[in-house]
Structure formats: structure tokens, C-alpha cells
Image (cartoon, rainbow, N blue to C red):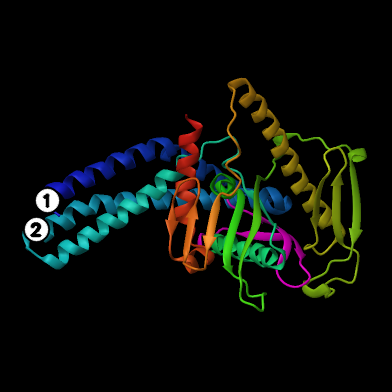
């Protein structure tokens, strides 16, 4: 790489960073951090644990975002010096190191730029993620459990706290369904591009003849509701059933009827929670998920009205959004963005950043058309 090429690329990255700084409004973020730090130091903070959790979570997120931005800006400021030293000393090794740092910065800044695209009404919210097995029998149940692991590993990689609130185990292997809450700002905006049908092709480990099997699982992502959302749920509109929690194979994991299933009678929506210790806690968690489902239903109805006014006849992009092929070749491909990789093991271990980032960019592009 010539000195002129390096200078031009560094200048382009500096321009991107300036745009990112303007969109993020870093000074406003610092002011918000100061305000949250003052709230977090209040002696009565934990009198309301839920509000305290929101304050500390938001503070931690904003501090991390500002540190991330400042670290990238510092590295970008140092980059011209690395190239100058390499050129002055005619050191091929130093030049190669400077080029690697440039490539690394280009990737990191692109990731930060994606964050500025999360500007939807609910994008800043925490998220509920539900996974349900579809067609494919026991393979589909196993596939749903593989997806649950993929997403929880993704959360772990990013330091996002999560909590599995409900799991319905299949009889032979895998799960019928599961729901988990992701307690991180912008979790909804980030993960919502994962909503849709995920297709797996592989040699079935449950088939004694070793035949290839195609199975499906559905992913649903909802924003966590807040008090300002005002989704009214009259008591007469719900039916609450309690039952005993169970684990894999029907093994009892609770000796009391603490699990809760809530049915919203007007819509037929059913939510369950069995992972808390008490019936009251499970009921509160289930009601929170129901609130999110009803909020999402209201949002979809409003969007449908807008689409009708615009004459939008496009089908849902959620169907068949990604294909995972483990046999006869190895490939994961997003059917909306054409992003693909042959490293299926890494994807199933939670390395899905490239798919999520391209999905966010794709969504922004299609929304502006």
C-alpha cells in the first residue's frame, strides 16, 4: 500500500467517524452519563429494584459506548504515525502491522456505524426472543435448541445479560419452544433483524439410515414494554392457568404449581413462564411478555394501515430468512442480504455479527425505498 493510498483511506475513516460522532451525539451521551451516575449514587436507588436495574444497565451501556468511540478515535489518530514511521525506516514488518491496524479499524468503525442505523421507535429497547420448532419433527426440535444456544452465545460474547423465562421441552430431544429476555439497550433494534424462519439442512442424527433432513424453526423478537406504552389488559380478557414446572424428559423441577400460563382471550395469544421461584414472579414475567406481544400486534396493525395507504404489496421478509446447510457442503446464507460463510461451526457458536450488521443495513435500505 502506498503512502497516498493509506492517507486517503485514513481520511475516509475520519469522515465516517465524524458522521458517527454527530449521529451518536457524544456530548449528549456524556451529559446523560453524568445524570445517571448521580441517580446511581442515590442511597435509596435499590428501593425499586426494577428502576435501579434500568439505571445501572443504561449507565453501563452508555459508558461502554463512549469508551468504544474514544478508543477508536485514539487508534485512528495514531494510525498516520504508524505509517510515517514504517515509511521513514523502510520497515516492511512495521508497514504490514500498520496495514493490519488499518484493516482492523475499518471493520470496527463499520460496526460502530451500524449502531447509528438503529433509530426505530423501539430500537433502543431490551428484547424478548422466542424460538419455536417448526416442520421437521424431532430434528426441528433439536434445531430450535441449537438456535437458542446460538443466540445465548451471541449475548455472552457481547456481555449482554439474558434470562430464559420459559422452555417447553420436546419428548425425544430438543425444545418445542423457548423465550428469553435480553437485558441490554438496543437489544431489540439489533436482534429484530433475526426474526423469521430459519432453515437447517443436515444428515439427521436421529435417522438410523443417515438420511438428509430439512427442518425449520421460527424466531420472534419483541421489544420489552415500558410504562409509557399503555397497553391495557382488562382482567376479563385473560385466563390464567397454573401448573407444575418440568424439565427435560418430564423430570419434575418444582414441587409446587408455580408455573403460569396466560391466555389472552380476544387474540388467542398464549404466554408461559416457569423459571421463577414463585407463582407471583412467574405471573409478572408472563404478563410482561404478553404486554410486549400485544404492543407488537398493535404496531403491526398500524404498519398494515400505513402499507395499505402506500399500496405496499410486498410479502413479509421474515419467511425463509436464512439457510444453514451442513450437508452435502457447509454454508450459512442470508436470503435477504446474500451474506454467507462456510464457517458453520462459528455461526452456530454465536458468531453472527456479520449477518446482523448486513441485516440492519438491508432493513435501512429497504425502509427508505
Badge 2 is on which residue? 87
- Residue at 81% across / 57% down in the picture? 282
Vertical placement of residue 258 versus 37, above or below: below
Mark 1, secondary structure of its residue: helix
Badge 1 is on which residue? 3
User: Crowdedness of circle 2 by 10 Å Cα count: few (<14), some, many (20+)?
Assistant: some
Q: Earlier in the sequence, mark 2 or mark 1?
A: 1
Task: Pick the quarter of the image with the N terminus.
Answer: bottom left
Percent x, y of residue 124: 57, 42
Q: Total label count?
A: 2
Q: Is residue 203 left or right of residue 229?
A: left
Q: Give the extent of the magenta segment.
A: 157-185
Percent x, y of residue 76: 27, 50
Visible residue check, residue 324: yes
Image quadrant of residue 123?
A: top right
Q: In the image, is residue 164 part of the stretch drawn in magenta?
A: yes
Vertical placement of residue 253 versus 67, above or below: below
Q: In the image, is residue 84 part of the stretch drawn in magenta?
A: no
- The disc placed on residue 291 is none
Percent x, y of residue 340: 44, 56
Q: Which residue lies furthest to the top in this view?
A: 309
Image quadrant of residue 295?
A: top right
Nearer to the camera, 159 or 299: 299
Percent x, y of residue 65: 45, 49
- Residue at 40% across / 52% down in the picture? 68
User: Crowdedness of circle 1 by 10 Å Cα count: few (<14), some, many (20+)?
Assistant: few
Q: Are marks 2 and 1 in contact (CB under 8 Å)?
A: yes
Amino acid at each position: 500500500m502506498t503512502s497516498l493510498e493509506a492517507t486517503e483511506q485514513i481520511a475516509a475513516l475520519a469522515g465516517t467517524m465524524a458522521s458517527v460522532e454527530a449521529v451518536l451525539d457524544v456530548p449528549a451521551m456524556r451529559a446523560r452519563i453524568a445524570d445517571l451516575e448521580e441517580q446511581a449514587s442515590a442511597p435509596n436507588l435499590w428501593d425499586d429494584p426494577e428502576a435501579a436495574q434500568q439505571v445501572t444497565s443504561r449507565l453501563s451501556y452508555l459508558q461502554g459506548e463512549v469508551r468504544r468511540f474514544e478508543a477508536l478515535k485514539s487508534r485512528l489518530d495514531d494510525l498516520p504515525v504508524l505509517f510515517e514511521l514504517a515509511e521513514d525506516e523502510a520497515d516492511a514488518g512495521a508497514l504490514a502491522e500498520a496495514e493490519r491496524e488499518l484493516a482492523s479499524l475499518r471493520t470496527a468503525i463499520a460496526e460502530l456505524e451500524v449502531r447509528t442505523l438503529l433509530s426505530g421507535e423501539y430500537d433502543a429497547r431490551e428484547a424478548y426472543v422466542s424460538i419455536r420448532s417448526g416442520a421437521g419433527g424431532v430434528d426441528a426440535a433439536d434445531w430450535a435448541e441449537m438456535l437458542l444456544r446460538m443466540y445465548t452465545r451471541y449475548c455472552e460474547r457481547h456481555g449482554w445479560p439474558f434470562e430464559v423465562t420459559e422452555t417447553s421441552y420436546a419428548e425425544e430431544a430438543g425444545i418445542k419452544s423457548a423465550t428469553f429476555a435480553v437485558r441490554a439497550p438496543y437489544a431489540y433494534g439489533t436482534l429484530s433483524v433475526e426474526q423469521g424462519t430459519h432453515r437447517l439442512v443436515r444428515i439427521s442424527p436421529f435417522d438410523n439410515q443417515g438420511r438428509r433432513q430439512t427442518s425449520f424453526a421460527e424466531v420472534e423478537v419483541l421489544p420489552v414494554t415500558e410504562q409509557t406504552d399503555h397497553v391495557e389488559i382488562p382482567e376479563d380478557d385473560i385466563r390464567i392457568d397454573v401448573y407444575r414446572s418440568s424439565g427435560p424428559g418430564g423430570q419434575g423441577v418444582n414441587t409446587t404449581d408455580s408455573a403460569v400460563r396466560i391466555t389472552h382471550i380476544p387474540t388467542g395469544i398464549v404466554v408461559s413462564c416457569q423459571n421463577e421461584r414463585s407463582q407471583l414472579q412467574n405471573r409478572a414475567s408472563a404478563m410482561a411478555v404478553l404486554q410486549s406481544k400485544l404492543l407488537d400486534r398493535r404496531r403491526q396493525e398500524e404498519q398494515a394501515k400505513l402499507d395499505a395507504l402506500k399500496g405496499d404489496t410486498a410479502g413479509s421478509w421474515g419467511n425463509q430468512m436464512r439457510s444453514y446447510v451442513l450437508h452435502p457442503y457447509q454454508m450459512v446464507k442470508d436470503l435477504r442480504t446474500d451474506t454467507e460463510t462456510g464457517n458453520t461451526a462459528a455461526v452456530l457458536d454465536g458468531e453472527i455479527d456479520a449477518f446482523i450488521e448486513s441485516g440492519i443495513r438491508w432493513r435501512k435500505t429497504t425502509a427508505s425505498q
